[in-house]
Image (cartoon, helix red, strand yellow):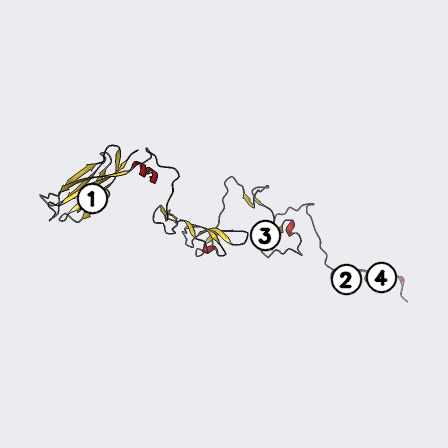
Amino acid sequence: MVNKKTFIEFILIALISSFICKYTFAEDVTITTYYPAPFGVYEELRAKKIGIGSAYMDTTTVNVADDNLIVEGNVGIGTTTPQAKLQVEDPAPDLTIRRTNNLNRSRILFRNSGGNYIANIYTTGAGNGDLIFRVGPNNANPQALPDRLTILNNGNVGIGTDTPGERLDVTGKVRMRTQTAAGDATDIVATKGYVDKIGVQYVLAQGAISCPQLGADKLLTSVSCPAGSKVIDCWMRLNAVDIPMWSQDSIGGGPSLYKLYTAADVATNSCALHYTCGGGWNGIVLGVKAVCLTLS
């Protein structure tokens, strides 16, 4: 005969076992915690994947890949009211893109709604890389877009060429919307309209070489631009052929040979042709031609 105490202990053990089995083996329990309620503030938060926004709340229909952060709305760094997909605010904000392998390139890619690439900005894979802008007809391959603007690490800029040899190297015509005007600085590039308006003229003077002794530097002849114009270049004329020669350019050799050079004098608005006597050049007729820009 079972006594009353033993029967009660048996009933309690049966109930506890049933409860444990039910919640341990029969179903999963999801517990949502808020600490401190109703929001959470944590010193450290780590996750393998995070989806932020109403569109990513349902884990049964939306899958966020591992090691990804997906945000439905705008992201603000330094601001609680971002007005764009990414807005960074700081008294002196910096945005750094660093590559860990100089054999690779760094890129910013732009795509259209169809998924094709329409533009990209990238640096070449060298330690002192160049910066290249590509824009063109959309393409599935970003590298297939044509180079439009290249900035080399030495400061040269190329438009239509990726190997600029000067500070500005352009393949194609350059249009200046603002016309050059009289009184502009001498290092301002002149527009075609200005040059056509003011015109260019050439003034020639000739002389014969006379060499009483070798090695003497002598002035052969000179020519001045007329009033209302200024000298922009000096040419030498030999056998009816104009040879462009800038200031102090020369042809020839050592003191036993000949030497010729032109020199532009801005103060006197003139060009001069000098020579150093060399054997066999006595009596040869040479000329100096001034290229004069007519001022408006």
User: Residue at 86% across / 61% down in the picture?
Assistant: 8
3D distance between C-alphas at marks 2 and 4: 16 Å
Circles 4 and 3, Cβ within 8 Å, touching? The answer is no
Label 3 amino acid? Leu
State the mark number for residue 251.
none
3D distance between C-alphas at marks 1 and 3: 72 Å
Task: Tell me the quarter of the image containing the C terminus.
Answer: top left
Label 3, residues with CA under 10 Å away: few <14, some 14-19, many ≥20: few
User: Residue at 26% across / 34% down in the picture?
Assistant: 229
Let me know if residue 191 appears in the view.
Answer: no
3D distance between C-alphas at marks 4 and 3: 52 Å
| Residue bearing mark 3 | 69
Circles 4 and 1, Cβ within 8 Å, touching? The answer is no
Above or below residue 252? Residue 227 is above
User: Residue at 79% across / 59% down in the picture?
Assistant: 19
| Residue bearing mark 2 | 21
| Residue bearing mark 4 | 11
Let me know if residue 289 appears in the view.
Answer: yes
Q: Nearer the viewer, mark 2 or mark 4?
A: 2
Report the front residue among 198 and 189: 198
Name the element at disc 2. helix
Which of the marked residues, 2 or 4, is nearer the chain's N terminus? 4
Residue 262 is situated, as x and y percent measured from the top left of the image, at: 20, 42
Which of the marked residues, 1 or 3, is nearer the chain's N terminus? 3
| Residue bearing mark 1 | 236
Name the element at disc 1. strand
3D distance between C-alphas at marks 2 and 1: 109 Å
Q: Nearer the viewer, mark 4 or mark 3?
A: 3
In the displayed image of the protein, which residue is found farthest to the left? 212
Which of the marked residues, 4 or 1, is nearer the chain's N terminus? 4
Q: How many tags in the picture?
A: 4
3D distance between C-alphas at marks 3 and 2: 38 Å
